[in-house]
Amino acid sequence: MDITELITISQGTLAIMNPTTPEKVLAAGRAAGLREGDRVVETGCGNGTILALWGREYGVSGVGIEAREDACRRAEQAFREANVEDRITVRCMDAREYVPDEPFDCATSIGASHIQGGFEATLDALMGLVTDEGTIIIGDRCWRSDRTPPEFAREWPDVLTGYEILSTVREAGLDVAAVIRSDENDWDRYESGIWQALLSWLGDNPGHPDRDFIIDYLHRLQDEYFGYGREYMDWAMYVLVPGFW
């Protein structure tokens, strides 16, 4: 099954496709100093919920970049429902190919670092989208410590520890202004939403040729989560600002 279709089936109905909450998304925007008139770009904007929240709460304008057509349609709907469609739009394209007409005040990637190939590459890409005074918000996985069992760590070679993320940020000339971390309830809710979406698809598609693949995928996700993910995997939004040196 195509990865795009798999993401749509497993996460397409989730308002926020990450283990976080609207309240924490708003807290990240507040920590970044978002205010009316700021221009924000989100790479891998998914269903548009995050930009819709910031647009409604803080009055920002901007653009979401998303490659999946079904997610782009959902994002447009989210912007309409939040009454921000006159200020926030979605571009249905590969975020790696996006070139802005002018730099933004804030660039963000929430749970979409896989697009660029990891945290460091994502940070580098976002820095190229903002002004010299611009802020960056990245939501990403990280290991809770550097003592993750090797057999688990090998499953996620691109995941860094929190300290490695801090070092990467400083090497780029930025400072961490805030970190908004997920808790176990956020993780349970997010993972359960994926399982329920997959089970719903299986119930609706009893004769689909990819049925066995989806069953295996569901069980693998659960094995990973109960086996080590809940204990060793962390997730947070990092609010980054220009460094003072």
Image: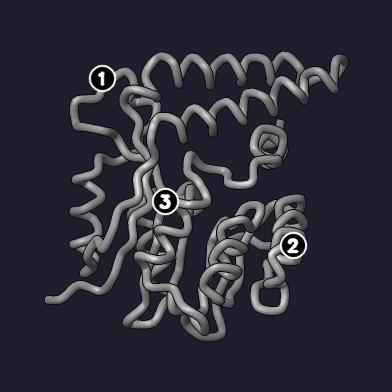
Dot 1: what SS? loop
Question: How are the colours assigned in the image?
Answer: one colour
**Farthest left residue in view:** 245
The residue lying toward the viewer, choosing from 186 and 191, is 186
Dot 2: what SS? helix
Q: Is residue 158 visible?
A: no
Dot 3: what SS? strand
Q: Nearer the viewer, mark 1 or mark 3?
A: 3
Q: Nearer the viewer, mark 2 or mark 3?
A: 2
Separation (CA) of disc 2 from disc 1: 45 Å
Mark found first going from the N terminus, 2 or 1? 2
Q: Is residue 173 above or below residue 44?
A: below
The residue lying at 40 percent from left, 46 percent from top is 140
For disc 1, the marked residue is 149
Total residue callouts: 3
The answer to which quarter of the image holds residue 206 is top right
Q: Are marks 2 and 3 in contact (CB under 8 Å)?
A: no
In the image, what residue type sits under mark 3?
Answer: Gly
The residue lying toward the viewer, choosing from 72 and 49, is 49
For disc 2, the marked residue is 81
Horizontal side of 55 relative to 27 (left or right) equals right
Mark found first going from the N terminus, 2 or 3? 2
In the image, what residue type sits under mark 2?
Answer: Glu
Separation (CA) of disc 1 from disc 3: 23 Å
* Relative image position of residue 9 (x, y in whole percent): 72, 34
Quadrant showing the C terminus? bottom left
For disc 3, the marked residue is 139
- Mark 2 packing: few (<14 Cα in 10 Å), some, or many (20+)? few
- Mark 3 packing: few (<14 Cα in 10 Å), some, or many (20+)? many
Quadrant showing the N terminus? top right
In the image, what residue type sits under mark 1?
Answer: Pro
